Image (tube, rainbow, N blue to C red):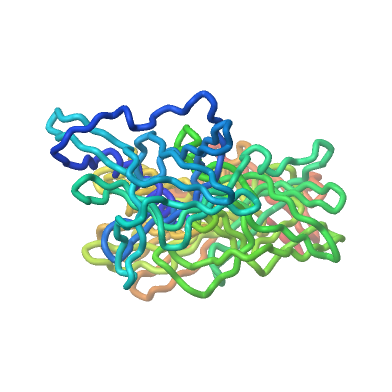
Amino acid sequence: MRKSIFFAALMLYAATVSAQRFMPVVKRSAATDDIITTLPSTAKDSLYLEDTYIMSGVRLQHYTWSGHFHHLAFDADQKTIYIKNLCSEYVFNTYVKGTIDGDSIVVPTGQHVFHQDAGDGKEEADLYLKAVRINDDSTGVVVDSETANIVFYVSKNGVLRTKANVGAAYVDPTGYVLAKNISYQFEPFDSLSALVQLPAKADTLVYDLKYKTETGEPEVGTKAVVAFAGNDVYVKGLSLNVPGWIKGSLKDGLVVFPSHQYLGRYNHAADLESDYAVFFNGAKDTGESGLFGEIYATVDSVAFTYDAATKSFSTTQSVTETIGTVNPYSHMVEPSLTPSSAIGYEPAVPEAPSIQNFKRMGFNYWLNITVPSLDVDGKPLNTDSLSYRLIVDDKPFTFSKSEYNWIESDMTELPYSYLDYQGLGSDIMNMGGDMRRITFFANHKTIAIESIYRLNGTVNVSKRYVYDVASNSGVLTGIGNVQGNPAVDGVEYVDLQGRKVSTPRHGVFVKIEKRQDGTTVTSKCVVK
């Protein structure tokens, strides 16, 4: 997930930085009264979603600018349209003006969109709207000086599109192209009506949600909320970052969720015009990998097999969360939903973490670990209450600020979700789901790891996984404690009906050890 989030943040951050740092240099003056900065009182804003390619650099590198909230203003005469920040990469907050002609919108080129006064080390500069196209051998984007208009074609459902491989640019009088977009689409959008609303009388149920981060990887656990209203099924939690409701329908043992359901805003910025829409989709693993991991292609819907007896449902397909229609934000592989035995999380013994390898990378070493988000019975844990710790060469390990420059303070335990430098560091990284990569600055003989789960005053420690570096192998040991196991003050046994038992005989019990340090350790006890 981290890699997908980083990609989205990188995509959106590029526009903000570039707009601030670039100022074109042109030695000429120009009046600014022909730049449209405010709308006439007769014009009314309408919200659209913009999809376009922002072209930059050589060899047609581009950002897929998808799902960007955009305002188009239509005049009361129904013949005039105003488009703000048409080249989306640069936010000058100026408009270009077009004319509505039947099912076409004609925007004349040459409109003045930006002026910069000389001073403070900057020279006077101006930018104008021009048409661009991909050149004949598809090696670059060129200004189409022979084209006097940029034309948008309007479909019956009100969507505005340019022809493929043509677009708009901001160009200075010398011909320098500052920003260029190719292949526009503007789709009418009402963010409030697009959100799935839960019916007022629908009863919600807490479910255990398990999924894989990639095909063939171990399961990750969390909670979701499900509601039934007749044959309609509502779920909140099948997206990791924007937890909006999605709606499906139950028929013939299948719950089918259509793709392209609006979840909410990306919340990259406070104002809507600088933000993006996020959508839920059914998806399939293409088997291909890109720069940011496995590639999951959107399909029309995702179908879950429904078990009426248990009210559980699962799928062998995948689901994705995308910024706009295509930019990945998160995904779940083979998710399953099972009614939870409890409304909230309960104290439990965490499943033991494991170490995949410890290997040299340049001058440093990488430790690859898995910290399960499930308990020993396969139920999801509250990861806000889960942490883990390392024992290196038989000594508790401390992450010190002297070595780990991006941590806030010395740490002997790492919270499950902790990443250094707010997730942008490289010493404590999320490699997807429960997998972490930790950088070490020296070689070691043995490394052990255990998880700690603190909930409702109860502290439970997992079994300890001990890894031998030389043999690249590890073994599980009993429940551990970094400071050693404090003396036990008392032991209680509880049967599966919650009744205290003085002397357990024949069956499964919960053993509760109360220790002198004030902690409580619970474990499953089987008496034969």
Rendered location of residue 344, percent (x, y):
70, 42
Total number of numbered discs in the rendering? 0
Rendered location of residue 167, percent (x, y):
40, 55
In this rendering, does residue 423 appear at all?
Answer: yes
Instruction: Name the quadrant containing residue 111.
Output: top left
The residue drawn where x is 61% and y is 46% is: 263
| Nearer to the camera, 254 or 507 | 254
- Determine whether, in the image, residue 252 is placed left or right of residue 454: right
The residue drawn where x is 61% and y is 48% is: 158
- Determine whether, in the image, residue 127 is placed left or right of residue 78: left
Rendered location of residue 96, percent (x, y):
41, 39
**In which quadrant of the rendered image does the C terminus lie?**
bottom right
The residue drawn where x is 37% and y is 51% is: 148
Rendered location of residue 489, percent (x, y):
60, 41
Note whether 136 is above or below 247 in the view shown. below
Instruction: Name the quadrant containing residue 334.
Output: bottom right
